[in-house]
Amino acid sequence: METVVSGIRSTGKLHLGNYYGAIHNFVKMQEKYNCYFFIADLHSLTTHPHPDNLHQNVKDILVEYLAAGLDPEKCTLYVQSDVPQIAELYLFLNMNAYLGELERSASFKDKVRMHPENVNAGLLTYPVLMAGDILIHKATKVPVGKDQEQHLEMTRTFSNRFNRIYNVDYFPEAYAFSFSDKLVKVPGLDGNGKMGKSNGGANAIYLSDTPEIIRKKVMRAVTDGGPSEENSSKPEPIQNLFQLISLVSSKDTYDYFNHLYNTCQIRYGDLKKQLAEDMIIATTPLREKIIDIASDKDYLHKVARMGADKARESADRTIKDVKEIIGFRQI
């Protein structure tokens, strides 16, 4: 069975874009592959989070992914910092990662430009830590977006370099992977682009949002003055609303409002009210699960410990092999 590794950000709440995108794929993957899903709290240290925020964010993300369908009996779900072997492999890989190639990373250049006051070594070596996350389990499949493909290419560079330096065929090459050929695009409420945490969270519907919050957000979604000609094309903000309707509403609902739009009878207030209610129906079971799981401290502790134990077992084998290959042996 092939091994899949994917990191889960340790900041921010999950929204419908995450749920209909990555999480749906993760739930499918755990049925077919040997999956390691980790909460990337070590990566978050580049932004210097407050200790209380770091702990709470990790707990919240664990709760929400469990509520969304990840099953700790079917996959290995763990917190990155609970597996110290990752940091050890990160150290070994850093010894064969070169300044020039790290500085050419597009994400590093972006961070330097956006946050010149915080250009730390963790940002520079982020691709090496990501490689450690993947190689510690000798994964061959990594679900990543377009923005991470360069880092995955660097992972292959580091693994092949290790094999070449020590004249071994130990680390496999890892490649980008998606369970489905077509990812679901979930647009935001601000009229352009995908759903995300921009604009203070007003652009996204979070899985934990209450019905009242959902109604307020949807009613503020960007629209226009309405069509002036029958069967005219929809501008992006309106197309986004119809895309959201197609995700959470019935086909009859979609067809009804689409007909009103095509005949210039659309009333966006009515459309938004229906969309909000259907979003509430779609998210209520998830929000209730989040509340239930968050209140069960014993269960959360059990899940975290079980995930850490399973991940360490795999990581121990890799670190033992790597140290032997490098030449670290007892005297």
Image: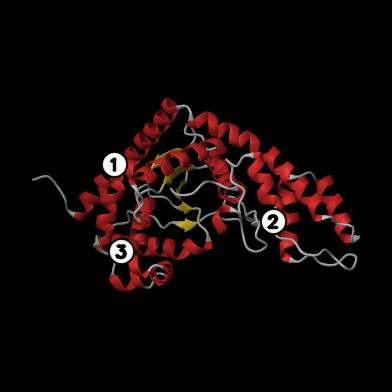
The residue shown at (47%, 52%) is 141
First in sequence, mark 1 or 3: give its number.
3
**Which kind of residue does numbered mark 3 sit on?**
Asn
Q: Which residue is mark 3?
A: 120
Q: Up-down: is 229 above or below 187?
A: below
The residue shown at (80%, 65%) is 225
First in sequence, mark 2 or 1: give its number.
2
Q: Based on the displayed image, in which of its 4 quarters is residue 310 positioned? A: top left
Q: Which residue is mark 2?
A: 221
Q: Left or right: where does residue 120 sit relative to residue 198? A: left
Identity of the residue furthest to the left in this view? 331
Q: Left or right: where does residue 75 sit relative to residue 167? A: right
Q: Left or right: where does residue 46 sit relative to residue 224? A: left
| Figure quadrant of the C terminus | top left
Q: Which residue is mark 1?
A: 316
Where is residue 88 drawn, in percent x and y? 25, 50
